[in-house]
Amino acid sequence: MELNEALERYKKLQAKMAAYGHAMSLIYYDGVTGAPKGTAANRAQTLSVLSEEDYVISTGKETTDLLEYLDSHREELGEKDRRSVYLALKGIREMQKIPMDEYIEYQKLMVEADDIWHRAKETSDFELFRPVLEKVFEYTIRFARYCAPEKDVYDYCLDRYAEGLTTETCDMFFDALKEKLVPLLKRISEKPQISDECICGDFDEKAQEEFAYQLMKIIGLDTDHCGLATTEHPFTTSLGSHHDVRITTNYHRENVSYSMYSVIHEGGHALYDSGSEDELAYTNLDGGAAMNIHESQSRFYENILGRSRGFISYIYPVMCRYFPEQMANHTEDELYRAVNVVTPSLIRTEADEVTYCLHIMIRYELEKKLMHGQLQVRDLPSEWNRLYREYLGIEVPCDREGVLQDSHWSGGLIGYFPSYALGSAYGAQFLRRMKEDIDVEGCLREGNFAPINAWNRERIWIFGRSKTPEELLENTLAEKFDPFVYTDYLEKKYSEIYNL
């Protein structure tokens, strides 16, 4: 077999794999957005069949032989093909270590877990969810031992979402944040609290939806290729390729900022996903490099841009048009302060910039203990509640507002949470670097995201998965990552807001 022939066969194989991924993603997306409640078993049946085919194609001898051949000629491959083959072989070698029957059963479990989590959250009943969550962690530990017996089981999970990430790195990172954020939060809590009256009230859901589409256009999303739907827990997904990206939100009539910032957050994900080079479409290099980089984009757009004075200056009159009664008699400065209120809260997705990483630290500590057998799933609610009391000084009134609030564990995303905190910290350093090339504040005051998006596209988005997270950080920052840039950013911003 000639190398060119092998590359052509590999291209067709990736297109086939992308088609299976497209179908399974559509089924999942339907399940969490518009599907009737009683249809989970139907989706589980279809996904089990597709998963089996996906498994056979992904790990079969023909595929393995093709990739081994390409890998043996890796010095003759271009940089992107070499990276693609590496990632494919890594995935195959791990998948081959998982028995096919267990892999299929796990896919069924994911559908069941998602369905039961929704019902458990609705009724605030952790005991309903507990048996299936125990299975999720059991499978996760078992698969980690199958795939990387030489690794710590939680390190394996962290690496799946942020290549190269370890518990040692996370411990150092969170210790650095804790050193600065806990005293900052204490100083803020001693000051008079800021009113968020202008974003609270009764905001019509239809008006919120129209405003959401306007936000998508403002930040630069192409609504011909990016859809918007509602779901219990907002998320973003690419269906087949970066040419079809979907975001979701959840409208709260009593607080317009929830949907506003979930749309901007998910919009950051969608911008990244849709920004890959066209040549990467239908390959395993399409989309984001890793979840820590992905979250750096979503958190950057949501907070560093979306809660800035410049953006609020632009969006204030827009909000007055969509919500004239609610915004009447409220000023631009009131809106800026309202969306930057710092107060310990129960819900991670509604947390302010200062307390957000404390929510992530709680989840990180719980996951680490669960994966190492130091905590049992049955004891999760009480330990969750204890940590919220210790870290944030608040009592958790029910499981719905506590341990059941996130969808991640029902989707098997163990090890994902630290990416949110890391991404938040990367964003502050991206801003410092971006300001050397762009008048960021000026762009935001004009609602002109084009220069900002172009800067991110050139340094991050176009590469898809063709570069490692570390390479992208080096490419973007031109210096080593420093978590104290983030804490300095928070210190400066909130010292001005709260007159510290």
Image (cartoon, rainbow, N blue to C red):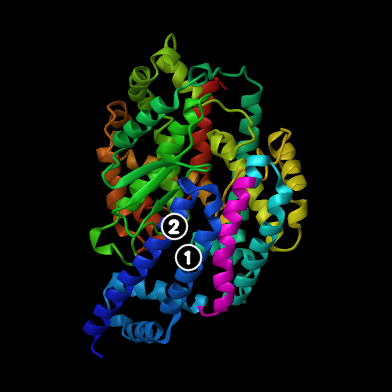
Residue 363 can be seen in this image: yes
Q: Residues within 10 Å of mark 2 (few under 14, many from 20)?
A: some
Residue at image point 51% right, 80% down: 96
Secondary structure under the numbered disc 2 in the rendered image: helix
Tell me whether circle 1 and circle 2 mark residues in contact (CB < 8 Å): yes
Residue at image point 28% right, 41% down: 223
Please provide percent x and percent y for residue 371: 68, 62
Left or right: where 412 falls relative to 230: right
Q: Residue furthest top?
A: 329
Q: Which mark is residue 27?
A: 2
* Magenta highlight on residue 106: yes
Q: Is 89 drawn above or below residue 248 in the view shown?
A: below
Quadrant for the N terminus in the image: bottom left
Quote the CA–CA distance across marks 1 and 2: 9 Å
- The part of the chain drawn in magenta is 96-119
Q: Is 151 drawn above or below residue 185 in the view shown?
A: below
Residue toward you, 487 or 143: 143
Residue at image point 50% right, 22% down: 338
Q: Which mark is residue 195?
A: none
Q: Quadrant of residue 186?
A: top right
Please provide percent x and percent y for residue 283: 32, 67
Please provide percent x and percent y for residue 103: 55, 72
Whichever of labels 1 and 2 marks the residue nearer the N terminus, that label is 2
Q: Quadrant of residue 98?
A: bottom right
* Amino acid type for the residue under numbered disc 2: Ile
Which residue was labeled with disc 1?
46
